[in-house]
């Protein structure tokens, strides 16, 4: 679809991105990969069995446990902690309206789980 947008509009990708951000706002994503095979059982217990999450500074809309522990915020952002299906690692990443907020919620999850 992206290639089609470029072909149809004749615009550069950077121009299309600027237009999308002007209309819908910018988003920032923070992605941290934590290798944690030794702690996997305990982290699974905390996140998926006990369904505990860290104290977060944004209003929570809802939490999903379909693919890890994903917290949706009222501001449209989210943070997820999920295990890789192919490697012994936990991925924690967030998408927020502000880069600093994305990094903040990832760090809160890391601290909550005793990582790094």
Image (spheres, rainbow, N blue to C red):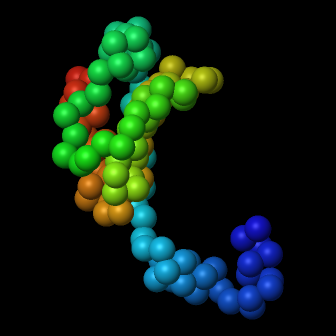
In this orientation, does residue 32 appear?
A: no
Q: Nearer the viewer, residue 54 or 10?
A: 54
Quadrant of residue 40 in the image?
A: top left
| Residue 26 image point, x, y percent | 42, 71
Count the numbered circles shown: 0
The quadrant of the picture occupied by the C terminus is: top left
The structure residue drawn at horizontal position 29% and vertical position 27%, both measured from the top left corner, is 53
Where residue 15 appears, as percent x and y from the top left, is: 58, 86
Q: Is residue 101 above or below residue 49?
A: below
| On screen, residue 80 above or below 44 | below
Residue at the (32%, 61%) spot, across then down: 99
Q: Which residue appears at 46% of the width and 31% of the height?
A: 64
Q: Decide which of 19, 72 is in the foreground and name it.
A: 72
Residue at figure coordinates x 19%, y 34% from the top left: 55
User: Is 56 displayed left or right of 4 in the figure?
Assistant: left
Q: Residue 22: percent from the left, percent from the top?
A: 46, 83
Say if 4 sits above or below 92 in the image. below
Q: Quadrant of residue 101?
A: bottom left
Q: Nearer the viewer, residue 62 or 90?
A: 62
Along the horizontal axis of the image, is 25 left or right of 67?
A: left
Residue that extends furthest to the bottom in the rendered view of this protein: 10
Q: Is residue 21 visible?
A: yes
Horizontally, residue 24 falls left or right of residue 59, namely right
- Please tell me whether residue 77 is drawn above or below residue 45 in the rendered image: below
Q: Quadrant of the N terminus?
A: bottom right
């Amino acid at each position: 679809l992206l290639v089609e947008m470029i072909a149809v509009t004749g615009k550069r990708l950077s121009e299309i991105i600027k237009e999308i951000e002007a209309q819908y706002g910018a988003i920032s994503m923070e992605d941290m990969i934590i290798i944690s095979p030794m702690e996997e059982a305990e982290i699974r217990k905390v996140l998926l069995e006990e369904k505990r999450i860290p104290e977060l500074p944004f209003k929570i809309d809802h939490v999903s446990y379909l693919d890890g522990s994903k917290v949706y915020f009222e501001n449209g952002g989210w943070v997820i902690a999920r295990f890789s299906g192919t490697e012994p690692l936990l991925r924690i990443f967030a998408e927020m309206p502000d880069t600093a907020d994305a990094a903040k919620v990832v760090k809160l999850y890391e601290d909550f789980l005793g990582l790094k």
